[in-house]
Image: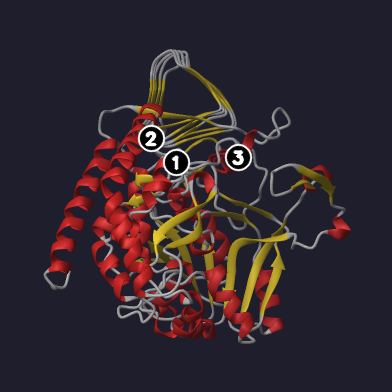
Amino acid sequence: MKMKPQTAVMLVGGTANFNGFSISPCPKALLPIANRPLYYYLERALATVGVTRIILCIKPDVSELVRQRLTLRIPEVDYEVRETNLGSAGSLREVEDCLQGEPFWLVNGELLLGIDLAPLLSFHQERETQATVAVIPVLEAAWEKERVELDAQKEVKVIHRIHPAQERRSMMRPAGLYLFEPEVLDYIPRNSYFDLKEQLFPILYEKGGAAVTWELTGYSRTISTLDDYFFANLDVLLGRVDFPDLRTSLDLNGTSHQNPPQLEPSVKLYPPYAMKPGAKIGSEAMILGPTAIGQGCEVEPNCILNECVILDKAKIGRGTYLSRCIVGEGAKVRKGSILYETALHQSNNGNGGTHVLHLREPSYRDAQAATKHLHWKTPAGPSYLKIKRLWDICFSTLFLLISAPFMLIIALAIKLDSPGPVFFRQERSGLKGRNFIMYKFRSMVSNADDMKRELLELNEVDGPMFKITQDPRITRVGKFLRDTNLDELPQLFNIFMGDMSLVGPRPLSFEEMRYNPRWRDARLAVRPGMTGLWQVEAHTKLEFNEWIRQDLDYVHNVSMALDLTILYRTLKKTFLDLIHTLMGRRK
């Protein structure tokens, strides 16, 4: 490749979500960094190496919002918004018509770059490689390499302290920036969910396609956590990073001079700060930089804002003190509040409330604190969790007593129908990634796993799922059990023991969840269920992206009312399936 790629694909996705905590309805690529959208910084970095068009791959539920917000500024490159659903690599196939058989950049929409990309481009051209992966070093202090080795009983065997010379893991991680030749698309199947890291690169290596790395030496930060977002704002406001060819239309020690905010004469401003038009700052308020205040924000009198990021249309009540805080779009802070290292966002239930999350910065004051809020946040409160657990115990006990005679009959039928055990046992991942043994009635022949390897080419679904309409591994009794969902009955033992719940995402292994880490982390924030939203909404659909959407919808909206609705629909569906099976009808 000798010509410069003129097209970049930006993976934007859906609503900005930080482990279940959302500060804005827009994707992360549109979140403001020092009052400029994140995609603007990527636009400038890419424009310096000849990019004239950027394709935004987004989820359908945010397409209108993204298009609307793109009109708020005049871009220096052409933007095209495309709705995609088939994973990080599958999305490239969905926009193949836009790439016109030419080399292209692929960039994560969560990436903040302050780097000259010309050396990477030159390196890619000189090596004549099919793919170049931008990487950044993983820096670990000596004490961070210490590991405690446990035996099967969780007792300490030894404590290892690995010397850097003994490290066998790669000390590089992908930065979220790639440069591809068009031939790479030939390795991506059409109309199928396909992951970039877990599927495309292994196939590239297996087929002999050349893929190399380029270490980024300038500024880069992936906005994965709220800490990342907070410090990205501080880095830009404090001038810690020099962005290539970045215009200075916004004075970081003030605001746009064309439409300044409304400031009372007694307001005290200490730079650096950035304010958008339409902001109102009340009397005797004090703004201590680095601070960014969004469009339409209202800061009432006598407030003190110290090192804060305030998104559009937020309202700060009178006499409030905020230090190192993030206030989400449209959120309201009650008057007289005193908050430190806190994120706030507007409630989604329409009651005008505000949700609060305590931030933990990875600082010298508490080096381990950054890990304390990394688990996915759900709307489930302590009362809901206690009631649901009590509900699970009571109903699993009741259903076990009622179904015990039928389970004995099923067990006898399985033994008479085919050789092998009565129960199918498999390790699955539960709440917070804890593994457990899940039980089901065996519905396949005993050597089903060996046969699966021979049937892989017949798989009718994408992603990690394996499903064949006429699966030859299913036994006669097994077909009846699957058609009536009676093969799931032994999972009542898992529910009683606390490994599962009556309602929740389908339990999977880590291997089956590796294609989408965000989906994996979200579903591991709740107990897996015997039934769930996917089973009642989309169980007959074969698209992996539909499964992801249903699981995320459940985790984001979990409530007792939703659980009862799913349980009712499951019982109704099971009863109808049983009637149809007994009458010989198709479901």
Q: Nearer the viewer, residue 362 or 319?
A: 362
Q: Nearer the viewer, residue 326 or 51?
A: 326
Nearest to N terminus: mark 3 or mark 1: 3
The part of the image, by quadrant, that contains residue 519 is: bottom left
Total numbered labels placed on residues in the image: 3
Q: Amino acid at mark 3?
A: Phe
Quarter holding the N terminus is bottom right
Tell me the mark number nearer the camera, choosing from 2 and 3: 2
Q: For residue 374, which numbered disc appears in the image?
A: none
Secondary structure type for disc 1:
loop
Q: Local crowd at mark 3 within 10 Å, few (<14), some, or many (≥20)?
A: some
The amino acid on which the numbered mark 2 sits, given as a three-letter code, is Arg
Q: Residues within 10 Å of mark 2 (few under 14, many from 20)?
A: some
Image spot of residue 557 (x, y percent): 32, 42
Residue 496 on image: x %, y %: 40, 41
Q: Which residue is mark 3?
A: 231
**In this image, 63 relative to 20: left or right?**
left
Give the residue at mark 1.
498
**Numbered disc 3: secondary structure:** helix
Q: Quick check: 2 left or right of 393?
A: right
Residue that appears at 43% across and 14% down: 283
Label 2 close to label 1 by CB (< 8 Å): yes
Residue with the mark numbered 2: 389
Q: Quadrant of residue 330?
A: top left
Q: Residue at x 45, y 41 (%)?
A: 497
Q: Can residue 305 be seen from the camera position used here?
A: no
Q: What colour scheme governs how the chains and residues are painted in the rendered image of this protein?
A: secondary structure
